Image: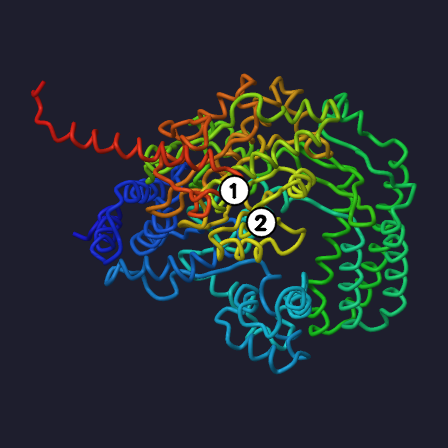
Amino acid sequence: MGMGASAMVERAFRRLWMRPGYVERADQLQLALLICDMIGSSTPSAFEAPTGLGKSLAALLPALVHAKLSEKRIAISTYTNVLAEQYWTKDLPLALSLMEEEAPDAGTARFLIGRSRYVCKAALQGQSDDVKHAVAMTERGTETEFRRLAPVRGREASTLWSLIQVPPVCPARACPFYDECYYYGARRSVENAKVVITNHSVLVTHGIMSSVDEEAKGLLGKLDHIIVDEAHDFAGAAQNGLEFDVNARALGTAISIAARASLALPQMESAYDRLKNGLEAVSRRLEARSLELPEGILTAVPQEVMDHPAVMGLKNEVALPAAIATVEEIEKVVERFLDAAELRLAGADMSAIDSTRNYIRWLTDFQSSCGRVFHPEGVAVSYVGPDGDGSRIRLDTVGLAEPLQNILWNRTPATLMSATLAVDGEFGFLERMTGFHPLYGEVMPSPFDHARDSCLYLPPRGKIPDPSQARADKSEPTYWAAIAQELGEIIETLGGGVLALFHSRVEMEQVARRMRLSPGLTLFVQPRAGALATGERFKEEQNASLFGLRSFWTGFDAPGNTLRCVALVRIPFEVPIDPPQLTRLAWMSTQGMDPFREHTLPTAKMTMRQGMGRLLRRAGDRGIVALLDPRLHTKRYGEEILLNFPEDMRRFSDLADAMGYLGMEGPSDILIGRPFHSQIAHRVCQVAEAAHVLREVQKNLLAVPLGVQ
């Protein structure tokens, strides 16, 4: 009798533990066995699996085992292309090697990301030999690979990529490079794969395409199970996938696609010219941010949301007629072009039909989406908003639960997992945000010893002003100065190694201007572009510190002594100022819910846990989480937030006590008398010595035989 799925998974892990450099992780095996059971029983499930547990291997091995034994088709989705490529290039080869002779056939697993992340071979023809050579050296023709090998860097690389990436629409089978196309080659390989590694954006698009009818296969084909890693980011990815923009960029894309369609059909020049002139006229008005289109809400559904005072307060009656006229004008211009194309297609040969099929479909969908702007469904809002120097008319789906149930959850059983998926130890917030209802859920224990390797530091009451009160009193400069003073003390005392996470660029830049650090202590501040390069520079210098925004709260990895403290400057409450946020909170209010307690506060709790998760990334890491928002002391919700941190993390109101507890020492030049914080440095030495003595006493006590008084 053959070995069962769980036994095969466990056997693979035992092979792993026998390899040099690997240790037994019972919780990782438990997660893998649970996922294996969920796939086998088609059970919707959710798992919080903390950083360091090894989620990727715990997902891949069960997926590969079931592909081998039951031929189930499983998609594994993660948030970014970089994480998806890590699954493919690092985690998958390891998983296959652990299965040895039990591994499934070659071709069982395949990789697919969005079309714009692949090189277009037709566009490549006009490039230099250096560029062609760089592309030829890639394995999959992806943007990540190309950027590593490209002959240029930075903005030049981005400009170059925009010229050679697969466009939003292409001739597909009618293209002379179709058979060797990187993107369509990946699409074809996925059709026969049992395990597909992808990202959230592709998974959402697949769901939309496959929900058209029961026979539709979408991008990934019929699936038996979905594993969503980094699931805390899935709602945001879904909202991006369901949005629709009318702006200068979208109109430019429509003009470009119409141009390609007209080239393949006879006598379309005049129809194309009318479309081009019409859409360019609309684009100019949007780019000029016409006074006819001031910012504000145009319409929201359901009606009780539209009638809510917060939404009505942002409703723009002045812009509504002009916005309706703008969208209707676009619809008519596109419709006239499509009518002309239909007449030409009636007498065209198969080559022309094949060449234009995808272009006509895209323009038809674009026209249809324009029609939905003022007739949205579910819980949604249409509004005029800024778009660079111009304006845009935008439709956002706010209530994601019903759409996601229709396109994914009701069609395919799923397992969602993340290092921060639960709030207050439960998955209720996840259910409200995504409509996903797990029949089984578990919060896995952290592999780190938080009591030994980390602690919380909260400055004493009164040291930092309340940021909300400072805004109300217009005394924010005093608040910024207090934050700069506190961060300065932390950085000086630790000798750098501080990641300070901000919720507002204005606040970050104001605090940075007030920083005064000793020579030799470097401070990086996240720029408006180039966050990745800034993060890499921070990791290269042990005495450097970094001020970062949202992109550094999640996914940033700086293990070892490079990062010794994560400072969360303020509680990251969502400020409901834009139409989607206001509409979401208004809808919750109409449903009898408390928007603050059931959305704003849970979101902040989860985000703060994500920020804290930057600290301990590998075995041997240690450090301090500094919480600088005084509302954690003074507001009732403050203790609720603190209870979402590991319960065994000690709290300190004295930085020296926190450092001494962890056995951390300041830099040598501080300890020999740098005047800025000589008192704190002396205190650190005292506390560290006392902690050492205490640990020795504890060892001696543990060595005393039981029963000895």
Residue 444 visible at all: no
Amino acid found under the numbered disc labelled 2: Leu
Q: Cβ–Cβ below 8 Å for labels 1 and 2?
A: yes
Mark closer to the chain start, 1 or 2? 1
Q: Indicate the position of residue 357 as horizontal and vertical percent values.
A: 69, 64
Foreground pick, 197 / 15: 15
Disc 1: which residue:
491
Q: Indicate the position of residue 28 as horizontal and vertical percent values.
A: 31, 44
Foreground pick, 169 / 695: 695
Q: Is residue 699 above or below residue 615?
A: above
Disc 2: which residue:
523
Quadrant in which the C terminus is drawn = top left
In this rendering, the count of numbered labels is 2
Left or right: 471 in relation to 274: left
Q: Which mark is residue 355?
A: none
Query: Which type of secondary structure does the marked residue at label 1 adopt?
Result: helix
Residue at image location 82% in from the left, 30% down from the top? 315
Query: Which type of secondary structure does the marked residue at label 2 adopt?
Result: strand
